Image (cartoon, rainbow, N blue to C red):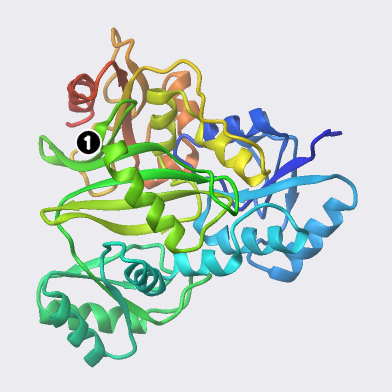
Amino acid sequence: MAPDRGVLLVLGPVPHAVQDNLLHGAAQELPVVLLNDQLPTWERAHIAGHMRCDVHDDRALAEAVTTFRSRFPIAGITTWNEECTHAAAAVARRLGLPGPSPKSVGRSLDRSLSAAALVAAGVPCRASVHTGGVEFARTAAARFGYPVLVERVGSVDGPVRADNEEQLLRTWAFLASAPDDTPGTDRRVLVSQCLEGEVVTVDVAVRSKAGAVAAIALTRHRTVDVGRARCMELSVSADDPLLEDLAPLAVRAVWALGLRRTLCSVDLVLTGRGPKILRVTSRVAAGLGPYLVFLATGVSLGRESAAVACGSGARTAGGAASGAAAARIFRPGSEPLVRGGERRVPIGMPWLRRYLLLGDPAGPQESRRSATATEQAEGLSFAVVVADSLEQARDRLAVAAARMVA
């Protein structure tokens, strides 16, 4: 490995869902070296090297990066794993590389601090507060109005909805006493407003400390019932008018949190009183979203994040694109689903890009390449389609997804 411009370090595990899309895009920008505690498998097709290191151990991480830099130039550092965002920012700052400040990343990771910063900047957002005790939680919920969302800070499990005070107290007691078995968690409990409305994600690239901000794409989220099963539907359209409408608000949110020289994902909810910010993260959103953006617009968020991390110019000019793409994802508990081997993968559907049945160990090449053993073990099933328009994509998705329900 003898890179001219240096290499891109990617910290932490790469998200499982259609993970090759991110790595493939990043590798088009610069040689990629993974830094995590897992030996690479499918990643080998897209990387120039790998260093085995516990990225949650600050000392071990610093030693590994220092040793590597003594042999090879490092052009930038990025991560697509939320648990590693602060570590990536800290290493980039220590090495004088482009990237957001550790302080701004920490602010984005803390929902309460994020909400305070957004409110101070006049950006409409969901209210969230840390609860130091059960009485504080009850007061916050009464101020927000039920239902509310309750979650433990740093947990990967996500929030729990509480529709009344009894549910709030029961959930708070459980979360406050849960064991510390996940790195980065603590015993603080967060209570947030539960806002109703369509949820969307806007990807925003901040290419410099002074500005050069661009909203790249918008992904729509909605829950859909297919027969007796429930799934999450994601969709992207290259000419979605919502992107132009919501881009200024998304950019204001990123700016308010002080995030610079990074690719951010901004989650918003479209309420009856206008859009509100749900969350801002200093990384590309995990899951199928980046793959849908690539199919619909031709823009690789993997390559864009690599370019921003290395201080390069814009890379938003994509290749061939379909115009629209959509996916439906069935997760554990969405029974009854067809299991792998019980029904053949649909044929005669040239617009079907990825298709994975529950526990399918040997589907067609596209399905095998899009699914890891972890996805299969977790019981994920999904279908991805492309089309000329959002309406056509949803119609095609309904046809493909209907075959996944028993």
Query: Which residue position is annotated with label 1?
Result: 337
Count the marks: 1
- Using the image as rendered, state which of residue 178 and residue 398 is in the foreground: 398
Q: Is residue 67 left or right of residue 58?
A: right
Residue occupying image coordinates x 29% and y 29%: 326
Residue at 90% over, 52% down: 70
Which one is in front, 56 or 195? 195
Residue 87, can we see it? yes
Residue 289 or residue 348, whichever sits in front: 289
Decide if residue 46 is in sight here. no
Left/right of residue 260 with respect to residue 349 in the rendered view? right
Figure check: 28 above or below 264:
above
In the displayed structure, 286 sits above or below 255; it is: above
Secondary structure, mark 1, is loop
Q: Quadrant of the N terminus?
A: top right
Indicate the position of residue 132 as horizontal and vertical percent values: 34, 89
Disc 1 packing (10 Å; few <14; some 14–19; many ≥20): many
Residue at the far front: name it.
210
Residue 110 placement (x, y as % from top left): 43, 71
Q: Could you tell me residue 284's position as x and y percent?
A: 48, 46
Answer with left or right where residue 139 lies relative to residue 34.
Answer: left
Kindly identify the amino acid type of the residue bearing the numbered disc 1: Leu
Q: Is residue 146 left or right of residue 264?
A: left
Identified at 79% across, 40% down, the residue is 6
- List x then y, in percent, for residue 81: 53, 53
Q: Which quadrant of the figure has residue 34?
A: top right
Residue located 86% across and 33% down the image:
2
* Quadrant of image for the C terminus: top left
